[in-house]
Amino acid sequence: MNKPHIVILGAGYGGIMTAVKLQKQLRQNEAEITLVHKYDYHFQASCLHENAAGTLHQDRSKIKIKDIINRSKINFIIDDVMSIKRDAKKVRLKNRELHYDLLVIGLGFEPRAEGIPGLEEHAYSITDINSARFVREHIEYNFASYANADKKDDSKLNIVIGGGGILGVEFAGELVHQIPDICREFDIEKTQVRLYMLAEKNSLLPGFDKELEHYAATSLQSRGVEIIHSDQLKAYQDNKVIYETEETERKIPTHTFIWTGGVQANPVFEKAGLALKNKKIEVHSNMLSTIDDSIFVVGESAYVTNENGEEISPTAKKAIEEAAVTAKNIASRLRNKELTSCRPVKQGMFATLGRDDGVATVQNRRVFGWKAVVVKRIHDNHYLYQLGGWQLLLKKGHFHLL
């Protein structure tokens, strides 16, 4: 009798943690497990803003997948997911096709251009290690280009972050910390650099307490970040960000526009005919798709609500909790046991504002300044311990608390 085949798509927080927990819970003869990911490494998405700013080398955020999976239990394939054929229970990859009995979807979002002219073609995003590295190198290139040009182009020293949110705020905080070092390297006066944040009209950190949001804005502004609350981003064309505020069109000349705003569902979801809500796959409390009981969904792919029916923001903590429930339910399904529900966890919210400043909500308590940074570092280190124990924590841990 053939062993049931479990296929896990994506090695983000939810996918990799599902794989790690399954290899502990299932005996070798119970199932065949295949993990599919586009890279040979998992990365800590919560550190991408540091990689993009250059305050943390990208290799510190990479975790080799072969170092944390049991390869006698899990077959690891490096490939791109092209489509899911639910009727045939097959996944089409770029280079092969896989049949599954149970499928775990842990694929992430994609940036959304929001229909704004020039955004998709010319703006930069921070979605993975490669894009973060590209942003860092692009900024350094523009500084070097400015320093070596006979005719100076000030727009090369203008950096605009559009969209706000946690990623935008954290990137601004890291970048304003790093700019003096970049300026020293290329013999540029720090006062010549302009760092703008183009946020939504009334919100810089959606979902955060207003007091924390005000603290974050004040902290960034005190260090030189110019925060602009626009009514509408109209275009990014001819190296100019064009926006409207108070019914007046304004322009910022820049060669560097980083978009940290909207996201869209992975096209694979829609092609598979899965039920979507707010760009995510609708699931039951046991993490099964609402329309296909052979598909589990974890992490930012899953649309999950709290007891009040409000959507829970996708975070690493949420993904880890869902992965634990998914792995347990897969084992229960194979052993003909009842499935359990994933209870919405009380989510802490964190946003660092550089190396020694930040804001956080922990158990309904507001945390400011360096204490918020310590909370974030502890959270990141706990994840590493859960994923790979002391060995991984000592190798990749974030011990630069301040």
Image (cartoon, rainbow, N blue to C red):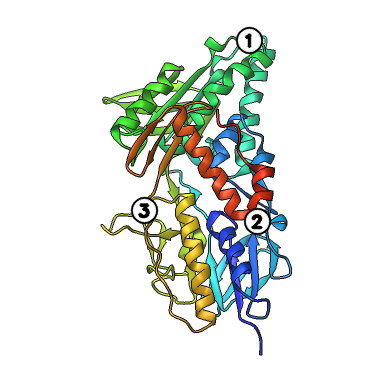
Give the farthest residue toward the front: 390
Look at the image and tell me in which quarter the C terminus lies.
top right
- For label 1, the crowd category at 10 Å Cα-Cα, with few meaning under 14, some 14 to 19 and many 20 or more, is few
Residue type at mark 2? Lys
Query: Which residue is drawn at the image coordinates 66% and 11% (left, top)?
Result: 187
Q: Nearer the viewer, mark 3 or mark 2?
A: 3
Q: Nearer the viewer, residue 96 or 213?
A: 213
Question: Which residue is depicted at the point 37% across and 22% down?
Answer: 218
Mark 1 belongs to which amino acid? Lys
Q: Tell me which corner region of the image, top left, top right, bottom left or bottom right, holds residue 339.
A: bottom left
The local secondary structure at tag 2 comes to: loop
Q: Tag 3, which secondary structure? A: loop
Relative to 245, is 382 on the left or the right? right
Where in the figure is residue 228, as x and y percent of width and height? 37, 25
Estimate the spatial distance between the alpha carbons at disc 1 and disc 3, rounded to whole Å. Answer: 51 Å
Q: Which of the image's four quarters has the N terminus? A: bottom right
* Mark 1: secondary structure: loop
Q: Position of residue 361 (x, y in %)?
A: 37, 39
Looking at the image, is 217 positioned above or below residue 338?
A: above
The residue lying at 51 percent from left, 44 percent from top is 379
Specify the label residue 312 is tagged with: 3
Asked if disc 3 and disc 2 are in contact, CB closer than 8 Å, the reply is: no
Give amino acid for label 3: Ile
Foreground residue among 380 and 13: 380
**Mark 3 Cα-neighbour bin, 10 Å: few <14, some 14–19, many ≥20:** some
The reply, left or right, for residue 84 in relation to residue 282 is right
- Please name the residue that numbered disc 2 is placed on: 38
Tell me, yes or no, if residue 230 can be seen here.
no
Tag 1 residue: 151
